[in-house]
Image (spheres, rainbow, N blue to C red):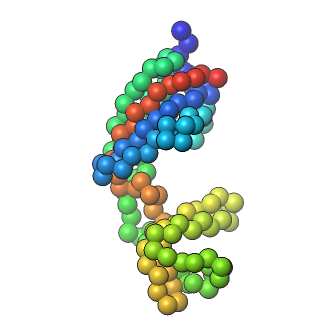
């Protein structure tokens, strides 16, 4: 039976549980995710764990935050002048905004506080500072 190798495109179902009990799952959307092992679309420890897996095999991978999305960093909490935000956007605590960076990548920020002339946003990845447990099932090797 074929096993997953570097440069193979695979489809997996996964469930991710944070140390705070939050749960994310591809099964909730009924769509497995596809990626090519070794191309960096997934966290490297997850890609590495896929190597050698067989069809329908399941694996649990525990990642401390250092191996996942890193620590939550206070310096990524920033103040943004409201004047740079389009007027049609209703600003509220918890709202995620997306900015296009100079290199074309998108950056997500979450609003922590709305003041008269500024908003305070968190640029940390929403899983930063959280240990993660991934339960993965390899469902297809393309």
* Residue 122 horizontal side relative to residue 62, left or right: right
Residue visible at 45% across and 62% down in the picture: 124
Q: Nearer the viewer, residue 79 or 95?
A: 95
Quadrant that contains the C terminus: top right
Q: At which x and y percent is residue 137?
A: 46, 27
* Residue 15 horizontal side relative to residue 6, left or right: left
Q: How many marks?
A: 0
Q: At which x and y percent is residue 135?
A: 40, 33
Q: Is residue 35 above or below residue 66?
A: above
Residue visible at 46% across and 86% down in the picture: 115
Q: Nearer the viewer, residue 113 or 71?
A: 113
Q: Nearer the viewer, residue 8 or 115?
A: 115
Residue visible at 58% across and 62% down in the picture: 107
Q: Nearer the viewer, residue 32 or 70?
A: 32
For residue 7, what is the image quadrant? top right
Q: Is residue 61 above or below residue 4?
A: below
* Residue 79 horizontal side relative to residue 88, left or right: left
Q: At which x and y percent is residue 121?
A: 47, 73
Q: Is residue 100 above or below residue 86?
A: above
In this view, which residue lies farthest toward the top? 1
Residue visible at 57% across and 68% down in the picture: 97
- Residue 16 in view: yes
């Amino acid at each position: 039976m074929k096993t997953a190798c570097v440069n193979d495109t695979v489809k997996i179902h996964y469930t991710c549980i944070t140390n705070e009990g939050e749960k994310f799952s591809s099964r909730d959307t009924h769509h497995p995710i596809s990626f090519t092992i070794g191309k960096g679309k997934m966290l490297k420890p997850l890609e590495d764990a896929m190597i050698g897996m067989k069809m329908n095999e399941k694996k649990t991978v525990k990642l401390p935050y250092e191996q996942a999305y890193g620590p939550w960093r206070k310096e990524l909490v920033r103040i943004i002048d409201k004047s740079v935000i389009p007027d049609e956007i209703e600003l509220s605590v918890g709202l995620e905004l997306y900015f296009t960076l100079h290199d074309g990548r998108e950056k997500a920020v979450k609003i922590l506080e709305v003041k008269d002339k500024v908003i305070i946003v968190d640029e940390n990845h929403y899983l930063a500072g959280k240990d993660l447990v991934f339960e993965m099932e390899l469902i297809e090797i393309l």
